[in-house]
Amino acid sequence: MKGRTPQPIAYGLRAHRLGGDADIAAPAHLIGDEARAAMLLALGSGRPLSATELAAAARVRPQTASSHLTKLVAGGLLRVERSGRFRYYRIAGPDVSTAIEALGAIAPIKPVRRSATARKPKGCASREPVTITSPENSALRYSRRSSIVRRCAMSTLATAHRRSAARLSAR
């Protein structure tokens, strides 16, 4: 006991993977993309999902999602199931699920994304809500536009009205 060198602790790594023969960079590169990671997390429930559902989960266009899904299938992380003319994707096996869960345990929490209402839209002079009281703008009040569009439209109308009033008083 006295002359033995301490053995390194493997922390649960499989013995055949310790020799350096595992190319962990390849799946890490696939999982490292934000859209692909979102797709893999969406598939974490175990239920197969279509490319359209995965595109929505990753907040990308369907064409982009198709490209990402092709890479994930080629990399062995996903499996494709065909049902008629539809294709459904699921996680390839329990090893992939375990790896994603392990990464989730050490990953930092993502910051909350700002909502569309928190951003100041282009061309909008003010973020302040505008009260619409004039009868000529009552149609705008009852329109189905979002509050941002309505505020910007009113701000633009108010600016145009002030400019025309200034031009008339200058004459």
Image: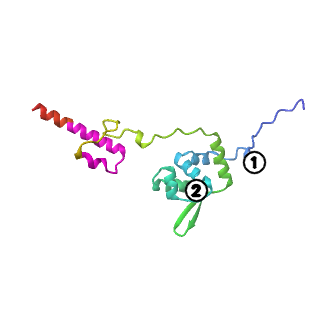
- What SS does tag 2 mark? helix
Which residue ends up furthest to the right in the rendered image?
1
At label 2, which amino acid type do we have?
A: Ala
Left or right side of 140 for 57: right
Queried whether the magenta region covers residue 25, the answer comes back as no
Colouring scheme applied when the structure was drawn? rainbow
Depth check, front residue: 5 or 69: 69
Q: Residue 38 in the image: state x and y as whole percent.
A: 55, 49
Q: Which residue is mark 1?
A: 16
Q: Are marks 1 and 2 in contact (CB under 8 Å)?
A: no
Depth check, front residue: 93 or 6: 93
Q: Residue 136 in the image: state x and y as whole percent.
A: 22, 46
Which quadrant of the figure contains the C terminus? top left
Depth check, front residue: 142 or 92: 142
Q: Which residues are magenta?
A: 137-161
Question: Which quadrant of the figure has residue 47?
Answer: bottom right
Queried whether the magenta region covers residue 160, the answer comes back as yes
Figure check: 88 above or below 33: below
Figure check: 138 above or below 88: above
Question: Which quadrant of the figure has residue 129?
Answer: top left
Q: Residue at x 61, y 54 (%)?
A: 45
- What SS does tag 1 mark? helix
At label 1, which amino acid type do we have?
A: His
Q: Which residue is mark 2?
A: 74
Which quadrant of the figure contains the N terminus? top right
Mark 1: few, some, or many residues within 10 Å (few <14, many ≥20)?
Answer: few
Residue 41 visible in the picture: yes
Q: Residue 22 in the image: state x and y as whole percent.
A: 68, 47
